[in-house]
Amino acid sequence: MKRFICILFTLALFGCEQGFDRFELGEIKFDAKTISRAALTQGSIESGKVFVCGVQNNSTKIFDNAAITRDSETGKWFAATKRNWTEGSNYSFHAYAYNTATGLTLEKSKDGLEFAVQQPTSYNESAMIDYLLSYSFKVADGAMKPIVQLYLEHAMSLVEIYVVRGNMFDARLTKMTFEGVYSQGSMKCTAQAVANSGETNVWEVSLAGNNNVVYTFQPSTPATIGDERDNTGAKMSIMCLPQQISASTKLTIEYEVNEKISSESPDNFVAHKEEFQLYNYQPINYQSGHRIIYTATVDSGVNLEGSISAWKDAGYIEGTVLPEIN
């Protein structure tokens, strides 16, 4: 008995001297890392723009749109108000994040599952709203004390436009216009998938206003058109509300081609203009979490190709950004 009391006394002293938190091992911790191919950067999620909702026993809200921040030492994420696991209780968590509050209206009473968005009406890549929602993360028994992994999925559609050159001496872009999409609407998550289920969240989109937005990229000096997507200066990146495109959705490319006779001849830049009705190209539906890529190859004319892929390039569930897991 004396030995047992001595051990307890030693632990008490250690706790006072070292700042030991006896509840640390039972504290609810989160992990939300590595957002890519988006306006939402690692820097912005570390500045307090990830919010968590958590419910205990299907009724008690223990995290109510609580901002979480990353501890630089442990790499884990915490809410300012600490909560501990309770053995025998079940839990359900989800999180949401966004890169800017400008143009975004959240229904906080809906736990981030409903929001209204107004994307910029003129081209401004840094002002495009990126909104992410995690899958549900369920714990059957609080005694498990897991790190709550926040698997985040993009709600917007990412449209990327690249102009590349074919077999020519030189080409440069003077102006590119993308028009005929809705920039305003609201989104509601009607079915939230469970983490690791292979499913995605289901969004109900209500568009508002008119599909008359015009995004124009017009560099002060003509942009060099490279021979690959990764080295061309002629490109646009647009975040769109998910929508079906119409006959008015168009891409217009204005460019100059150096049509000199040989590499030794003097430059002879000739202006060209091509318009593409995007309804004639795949895809005709911009869906949540999808990356739509248009590649226009400039040669004696322009050939446009449209494709769709997962937001992250490979090895991930379509439309999903998976965090690093320590």
Image: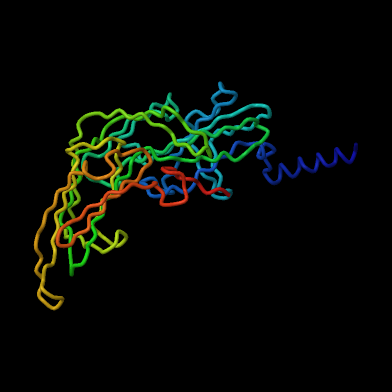
Q: Quadrant of the N terminus?
A: top right
Task: State left or right for residue 255 relative to residue 236.
Answer: left
- Expressed as whole percent of the image width and height from the top left, the position of residue 299 reads 18, 62
Task: State left or right for residue 183 relative to residue 56.
Answer: left
From what the image shows, is residue 191 above or below residue 270? above
| Color scheme of the displayed model | rainbow
From what the image shows, is residue 261 above or below residue 30? below
Task: State left or right for residue 33 relative to residue 87.
Answer: left
Q: Residue at 64% across / 37% down in the picture? A: 145
Q: Residue at 9% across / 59% down in the picture? A: 271
- Expressed as whole percent of the image width and height from the top left, the position of residue 30 reads 55, 40
Q: Which residue extends farthest bottom?
A: 264
- Expressed as whole percent of the image width and height from the top left, the position of residue 88 reads 68, 27
Q: Which residue extends farthest right?
A: 1
Q: Residue at 25% across / 51% down in the picture? A: 305
Which corner quadrant of the image does residue 27 belong to? top right
- Expressed as whole percent of the image width and height from the top left, the position of residue 7 reads 83, 42
Q: Which residue extends farthest top?
A: 59
**How many numbered discs sit on the rendered protein?**
0
Between 118 and 172, the one lying in front of the other is 172
Q: Residue at 39% across / 46% down in the picture? A: 310
Which corner quadrant of the image does residue 40 belong to? top left
Between 140 and 12, the one lying in front of the other is 140
